[in-house]
């Protein structure tokens, strides 16, 4: 009879959590144990293997090369064990996934779609963490995030969700029954709603060859959702993102002006740590998000 040289399962669970979070305290919170219990299991596992799995550089915890290689195997084993357990039980195990997303994107793109995820994967509970900042996966309890940016974030797996475009839009109330602007220069006759953190109005006006439009006096906002709300109320013409105004355009609360769009140099990305990207539940949510934007995908 062959003897299997296997460490205790708890030691592997504790190691996977500590390695994924790079923090013993956060791993302890996730597993509902004390940090000393995590440390004890890690020391026991390192003693069993005869190898150091973690190193500390001042206050930073990181994996050794052996630890990185071992984690890949341990993660795959635990994922397969989780799937096999679900199959043996006969139903998926309930799990909560924390999804971080900006308030504007959550309210105008995500919320109206989230019910289909609940219908498709009822064993996954989604907790939406509304945040304007880019979350720190190492310090915050977040599994997946939808970020707006270039997609270049070291240590994170980033899949393009939406490659957006921007264009001018406003409420029909703004014209009070008058004809819509027909010349690009007509834009200057109306209040413009501006995003304080970007220069998209300047870029669009340069694209259509219009100069000398005063933007310094434009009503400015630091949130895309507020810009859209102000446009719907008839406060002015806004430079809007196509992904965020689907319902407003469909209902007629906003109308698009002109057919010239500005391609956004940034995009919306589904982001998660590379070490957690292939957890079964995380993979299901990633696949669902991308399929909502692009149709059926194989990930």
Image (spheres, rainbow, N blue to C red):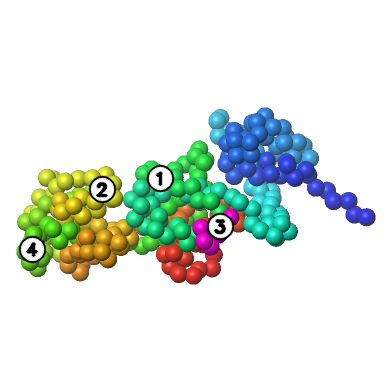
Q: Earlier in the sequence, mark 4 or mark 1?
A: 1
Horizontal and vertical percent position of residue 158: 47, 56
Q: Which mark is residue 226?
A: 2
C-alpha span from label 3 to label 1: 22 Å
- Can you give x and y, in whole percent of width and height, for residue 297 in the image? 50, 68
Q: Nearer the viewer, mark 4 or mark 1?
A: 4
Up-down relation of residue 157 to residue 33 (above or below): below
Dot 1 lies on which element? Answer: strand
Q: CA distance from mark 4 to mark 1?
A: 38 Å
Quarter the C terminus occupies: bottom right
| Rendered location of residue 184, percent (x, y) | 11, 64
> CA separation, marks 4 and 3?
48 Å
Which picture quadrant has residue 189? bottom left
At 27% from the left and 66% from the top, the residue drawn is: 250
The stretch of residues the image draws in magenta is 118-123
Residue bearing the label numbered 3 = 122
């Amino acid at each position: 009879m062959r003897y299997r040289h296997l460490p205790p399962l708890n030691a592997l669970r504790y190691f996977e959590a500590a390695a994924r979070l790079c923090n013993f305290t956060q791993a302890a919170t996730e597993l509902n144990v004390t940090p000393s219990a995590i440390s004890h299991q890690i020391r026991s596992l390192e003693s069993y293997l005869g190898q150091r799995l973690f190193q500390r550089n001042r206050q930073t915890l990181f994996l050794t090369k052996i630890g990185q290689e071992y984690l890949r195997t341990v993660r795959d084993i635990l994922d397969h064990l989780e799937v096999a357990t679900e199959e043996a039980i006969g139903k998926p195990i309930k799990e909560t996934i924390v999804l971080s997303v900006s308030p504007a994107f959550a309210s105008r793109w995500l919320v109206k779609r989230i019910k289909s995820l609940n219908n498709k994967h009822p064993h996954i509970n989604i907790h939406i963490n509304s945040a304007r900042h880019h979350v720190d996966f190492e310090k915050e309890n977040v599994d997946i995030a939808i970020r707006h940016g270039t997609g270049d974030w070291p240590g994170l797996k980033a899949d393009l969700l939406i490659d957006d475009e921007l264009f001018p839009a406003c409420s029909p109330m703004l014209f009070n029954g008058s004809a819509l602007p027909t010349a690009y220069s007509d834009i200057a006759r109306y209040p413009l709603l501006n995003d304080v953190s970007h220069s998209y109005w300047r870029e669009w006006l340069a694209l259509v060859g219009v100069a000398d439009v005063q933007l310094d006096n434009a009503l400015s906002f630091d949130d895309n959702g507020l810009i859209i709300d102000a446009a719907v109320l008839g406060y002015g013409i806004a430079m809007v993102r196509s992904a965020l105004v689907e319902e407003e355009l469909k209902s007629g609360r906003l109308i698009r002006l002109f057919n010239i769009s500005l391609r956004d140099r940034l995009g919306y990305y589904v982001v998660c740590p590379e070490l957690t990207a292939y957890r079964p539940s995380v993979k299901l949510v990633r696949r669902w998000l991308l399929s909502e934007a692009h149709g059926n995908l194989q990930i």
